Amino acid sequence: MKLYHGSNVEVREPKILQSNRALDFGTAFYMTSDYEQAKKWAKLTADRKKSGTPIINEFEFDDERLAELEVIRYESANKEWLRFVSDCRSEQRNGEEYDIIIGPVANDRTFDVISLYLIGVYDEDEAIRRLLPFKLKDQYAFKSEKALDLLTFKRGIFV
């Protein structure tokens, strides 16, 4: 299957780099199956870093071999997903027990809901109720070298 990584540089050999901010699924190499989402990430990354050119890195992902890895998949923004993302965003966990984590993106539109959940304004039920109207894109967090080995770089697409 095709997966995309939006960046400000071409990434032929993906690496797991420590971020300077807390992410949904902790430290990982993040990808999506949604081309438009990757395009948005590419533009955002180039703008944030004020260097490079927005580029979508296209990879082939050998998803037939998922059974060889420790994988957790969240099909929707449910309570388990909310707890996991909240724990990672508040740096209480990093999800290191998994090779790949798959699930919805807590994007800019959902950040306020998750922030209000984290400080206790919303309980889980209210946070999930407020997240349901959002059509959240997917993200694949590759958290181990074993997982990265299932990726083959295909091409870089300048946007």
Image (spheres, rainbow, N blue to C red):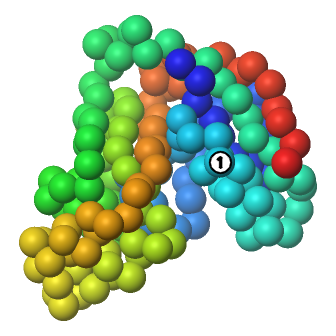
Between residue 135 and residue 81, name the one nearer to us: 135
In the image: residue 122, left or right of residue 109: left
Q: Which residue is mark 1?
A: 36
Does 41 sit above or below residue 49? Answer: above
Percent x, y for residue 50? 85, 69
* x 10%, y 72%: residue: 125
Label 1's element? Answer: helix
Between residue 26 and residue 103, name the one nearer to us: 103
Question: In this figure, what is the number of numbered marks?
Answer: 1
Percent x, y for residue 71? 29, 29
- Name the residue type under label 1: Glu
Percent x, y for residue 35? 64, 40
Does 1 sit above or below residue 7? Answer: above
Q: Quadrant of residue 152?
A: top right
Q: Quadrant of residue 156?
A: top right
In the image: residue 47, left or right of residue 36: right
* x 29%, y 13%: residue: 67
In the image: residue 38, left or right of residue 82: right
Q: Quadrant of residue 135?
A: bottom left
Q: Alpha-carbon neighbours of circle 1 within 10 Å: few (<14), some, or many (≥20)?
A: some
Q: Is residue 29 visible?
A: no
Residue at the front extreme of this rendering:
133
Percent x, y for residue 136? 41, 56
Between residue 158 and residue 141, name the one nearer to us: 158
Does 39 sit above or below residue 100? Answer: below
* x 46%, y 44%: residue: 139
Does 125 sit above or below residue 1? Answer: below
* x 26%, y 41%: residue: 75
Q: Is residue 62 visible?
A: yes
In the image: residue 146, left or right of residue 122: right
